[in-house]
Image: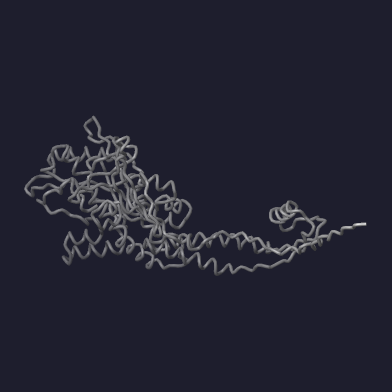
Amino acid sequence: MNLSFRKKKPVPEPEQEKPWVMVANEFDVDKELELSPIPVGTKQVKDPKTGKVETHIKMVSAGNVFSGVSIEDALSKGYGATVKYWNYYISTGVLRKCINMIANFTTRAGFETTIDVLDKNDNPERPEYIAAKETIDEINRRVNLDYILLITQIKRNLHGNCAWEIVPSNDEYVVSELKPLRSSYLIPEIDDDGNFLGVRYSGAMDEWIPVERLLYFNVDSLENDRTSLLGISTVRSIERNIKIKKNLERDLLYAARAMWAPIIIYEADTRGLTPGEKATLFNNLKTDLRPGATVITNRAVIPHVTQYRPDLNSLIRAQERQDEEIIGNYGIPKALLSRERTMARATLEFSIRAFYESTVAGEQAYLKRQLERQWYDPITQELGLSDKIRIRHEWRPIIDPQSDLVVALIRGFEAGVINSDEFFRRLGWELDRVEPGAAPPEVGNEEQL
């Protein structure tokens, strides 16, 4: 008998399952603290098929260059600082209060217009001069210039720039309205000599608004080029502080929950379970179990409780430190923001005066110069009086007339220690006085932008 024997294959022993842990933490500190990208240049590109000319925006972030057909295209893909800064403004209370505080102090007292004759022998009370001033005052009222200036200050600090389109009128008032423009759409253009020509703006007629129909304001335009004319947002220098503050707020929320909900590590015996059953068990443990819940199972699940004791005082102090950096960036006394626990009346008055003289007065001087050059001078020219008078923008005083500073200056003026020009300069009321006989500036000259 011929018998054949087959060697049986050894049955493998069940492989012991290796332990594993799933940790969900997708937070990237380096990426989170990266500064937002800013536009660095523009160029005109002509489509060879359609012949359409497009403006391409180049933006840089952490060494990466992005090019899009518009700033909005770049912003839609996550590039560009202004959209993120708007989110900071609406979600960070201390930032919003600082920006609004500066805008409020700068514009809240209102303004007056005065007549400055270019010929020192001329009479500023001539009827045609008074009529021109009344016309300009009526235009200011119709366009709601007080509110325009308040919004301008907020947008300048937030975006680095703010622009309004001057809409002409067919009646005797020359101007119909000031139309707001979105800062993220603005693309300033200059000629070969560095003169500001206007802005390319998506949605405008021919995608273009010339300087003659434009009120344009920005912050810290240090160079005379298109990128610099976009301005620098005051939020950029404290962007990391805002991000750190947001991270600390998140940590504080987690710590508040962890004070009563300890961290629990569940040790589950999944031997003999199919992959699908294992996934179901892990999902149930991760999503369904909450402190105080009743758990019923026919599998071995051993909990290991880790008590979490967060240092709330350190978290709160760290948040306050970031608030101080944000407030310090704008030079606002903490007492005005209800962040100073105790402050003597004399110290508070000194802080408010210092805030006015160091921050508010400078903002008012800038707005005054730009308004007189871009707003009042063109209207005066339309009225046919540009060679006779100049309309000046005068801010009303925001300091109490009975304050120590005003009283001291009045006594100094009465004693002959200071003259009238020095008196007004000290109060910031005449920061840009024009000497009689001085020629009005060129309307198209935008060097101060």
Determine whether, in the image, residue 443 is placed left or right of residue 244. Answer: left
**Residue placed most toward the observer, 180 or 172:** 180
Q: In the rendered view of the protein, which quadrant contains the N terminus?
A: bottom right
Q: How many marks?
A: 0
Residue lying at the far right in this picture: please name it. 1
Residue lying at the far top in this picture: please name it. 170
Whole-percent x and y of residue 44?
28, 44
Q: Is residue 409 above or below residue 226?
A: below
**Residue placed most toward the observer, 45 or 323:** 45
Whole-percent x and y of residue 438?
11, 51
Q: Is residue 282 above or below residue 53?
A: below
State the residue at coordinates (37%, 67%). Answer: 346
**Residue placed most toward the observer, 370 or 207:** 207
**Residue placed most toward the observer, 272 or 355:** 272
Whole-percent x and y of residue 378?
19, 41
Residue lying at the far left in this picture: please name it. 121
Q: Quadrant of residue 264?
A: bottom right
Determine whether, in the image, residue 245 is placed left or right of residue 433. Answer: right
Q: Quadrant of residue 62?
A: bottom left
Whole-percent x and y of residue 236?
38, 58
Colouring rule applied to residues: one colour
Determine whether, in the image, residue 41 is placed left or right of residue 33. Answer: left
State the residue at coordinates (26%, 58%). Answer: 222
